[in-house]
Amino acid sequence: MTPAAHVRAGQRRTAGSAIDDAGSVTEPRRRDPLPLDGLRVVSTANALPAAIVGQVLADYGAEVLLLEPPAGSPLRNHPAWGYWSRGQHSVLVDLSDAEGQERARRLLGRSDVFVDGWGSGVAARLGLAPEILEARNPGLVQVRISAFGDQSPLAGLKGWESVVMARAGGSASFANLSARPGPCFVSTPYCSVSAAHLALQGALGALLERERSGRGQRVRTSLVQGLLAFDTWNWLIHVLALRHASAFELEPAVDPGTLVPNTPFFFRLLVALAKDGKWLQFSQTTERLWHAFLRACGLDPDDPGVQQSAVSEDPAVRVRFWETLLRAVRSRTAAQWRAVFDADPDVWAEEFRNERTALEHPQLLADHRLAQGQDGALTPGALVEGSTWPAFVPRPGPRLGADTDRFVHQPAEARPTPADAGNEPVLAGVTIIELGTFYAAPYGATLLAEQGARVIKIEPAEGDPIRNVVGIPELGGIKVLQGKESIVADLATPEGQEVLGKLTRKADVVLQSYRAGVAERLRCTAADLLAINPDLIYVSSPGYGDGPPCGHRPAFAPTIGAASGLAVRNAGGWGAVPDGPDLDEMTVKRTAVKLSSAAMGIGNADGFAALGVGTAILLGLLGRRRFGGGNVLRTSMLSTMSHALGDWLVAGPGTRAPAPDEELMGVGPLHRLYETAQGWVLLAAEGERERAALAVATGVDLAGAGFETKLEAAFLAEPAARWQERLLADGVSCVEVSPQGVEMTVMLGPLGTELGVVTTARHPAMEEYPRPSALTTFSRSRSVLGPAPLLGEQTGAILAELEAEGL
């Protein structure tokens, strides 16, 4: 934090906090401007990542101008357009002629952020090359979202989500979602939503850095980098298996042929059918929760036979144990299980929801996390709530070209050239104190450590449970701990409270993700810590929320995946998920495996939530830097998932977002997976020129009846590699589907090196290992890829630092 920021914040302390009856400082209740008030953003708005960036920036006060061609953004035809474009402005500019290009340059000369979601090289071809824009406006932050990176061998591929998933191994990672062999088409936009948040974090970080340097810079991320934000530890298990092939053998969680569970984690994340035919997702990851669940199933957790069943070397024993749990769950209706949950808060399961019921979740309703769209339908509200920000009120999206005259004819402004700035990380000088466990909130802080923030994680003596969650010490926590410092302190003791208080005095942010009631018990609520540091940004990001009805429930990726609709969406919708009280045991088993994979694939609710946390923290930091004072920010896994699935959840009456067929081949004959003579391809021939070229290459009349069947036969004539080579040369988006998952395709395969998205790191438990490189990069500010600490590794150094500072 700069001295100027201290002065500005200090001037707001008296007015910024309220005093309760006991004389304690409570949460701030003033009403500051939104953090981005007064900033102008120009967005291409041509694809989902750019649309999400524009939506979030507009929700928090930025004046967002959608740079649309005369025919409008291609997203205008999507049922979710009104949701994505809310509160923004439409400016028509024909960039095919010199006059239109000059208008765009003048507009960007008066702007703070440019969001470029076009294909590689398009901006330069349209006269909007980064160096041209920078020369006119040195303060401009230029955010570039590509598919595979502009300098990569795949830069020429169009940025379809499906293309990236297919080429990077995502389609293979979800192969077990269908009974048929081969990869699966996944409709959840993992890459696009993640890349949008990485771009948001880059933009907000660059704006924060601009506050001290006066200079803008270029921010880069890609859809394939977005995909790498999700995997928590799977790629490290692959590393271990490859290094020690004689000792470790990679197996799926459940063998798809024999239906034999291969990991005890499968039982703790049990998917089961209740007596009345409703599917339930349990998540009992810690020992306390697991024992409570076993008792609820009529089993004795202290019985050695019960404990050994989940880890038995005998497959038959594991199968019988699975069947025992399935029958125990099926002995009660969903309502009867809810009574069990009410009696014991350590036992919990979510019912699987779909696109029509997910926004009706009682926690979203209780927390007022929803808004009404123009058609009266419910939509997700703001991504994060701030105690000092005005309440969110959605504004309608713009009519095509409605704001053109207002903006394109404004005179250009003289922009002073700021002094040269160094390459300090954008978050240099920012300190974040992390209170929480696992991945959903903590990885949000990890992303900011890459931008140079100092993240101090306070852990109990036994450490964050994620360190030991996969049975191999430390392996499960390496990714989420990278770049942090670990200090051991028991917050339930006076000594731990003293350490927390000292760290809070020097912190900019405190991040906590406890269940409701825990922060009160450990005396680390917003009111507790703002009393120590009124300038603090306090971020609460639990699984469900801070209060009833579900705030006290344990929330993990699978339960939130079920509650949000993620699992049902990935599975292909209710039509592809058998349900009802009369299902036979084999159907129950196969469907349980499918839903389990759908909720916990290569991407899950943990990753989405963490990305939202990173964005929330930066909104808070930038708002404080611009307007002063502390703030309390609230988000949750559940509310963030409603944003991530917004394209699916907000479709109004009579409309439906594009969805894959029940076999998960694709969303139509020209955008789907095809089997070839050797391997599979993903075809995305959405434009007229591409369709014409495809017809010539395959010899199939695409206007004729039954042409999909003819395309299937045509693709079977040649191998996938040949189809990719041939069709790409003709300008048709068609890529060979990687036969391996993301771990082996990107992290451990040549693609990661070719794209420049993988580097190496060291850890005592793994020695040298591959890790994702910086997921968001800057043209001037350097990234920081720090190591993952061992438990309490920095305890002594941090305590000595506090003592030396007189804290």
Image (cartoon, helix red, strand yellow):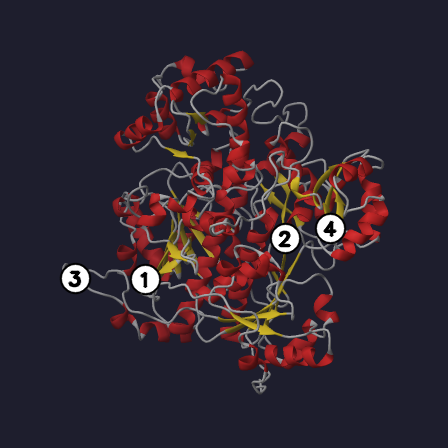
Nearest to viewer (mark 4 / mark 3):
4
Nearest to viewer (mark 3 / mark 2):
2
Label 1, secondary structure: give it.
loop
Which one is earlier in the sequence, the residue at label 3 or at label 2? 3
Label 2, secondary structure: give it.
helix
- Toward the viewer: 672 or 211? 672
Residue 94, given in percent of the width and then of the height, sits at: 68, 74
Amino acid type of the residue that numbered disc 1 sits on in the rendered structure:
Ser
Q: Which residue is mark 1?
A: 387
Gap in angstroms between the C-alphas marked 3 and 1: 20 Å
Gap in angstroms between the C-alphas marked 3 and 2: 50 Å
Amino acid type of the residue that numbered disc 3 sits on in the rendered structure:
Gly
Q: Please say if 170 is above or below 406.
A: above
Residue 345 at least partly seen = yes
Other-residue count near label 3 (Cα within 10 Å), few / some / many at <14 / 14–19 / ≥20:
few
Q: Please say if 237 is above or below 78.
A: above
Which one is earlier in the sequence, the residue at label 2 or at label 1? 2
Gap in angstroms between the C-alphas marked 4 and 3: 66 Å
Which one is earlier in the sequence, the residue at label 4 or at label 2? 2
Residue projecting furthest to the front: 705
Q: Which residue is mark 2?
A: 223
Question: What residue is drawn where x is 48% and y is 33%?
Answer: 469
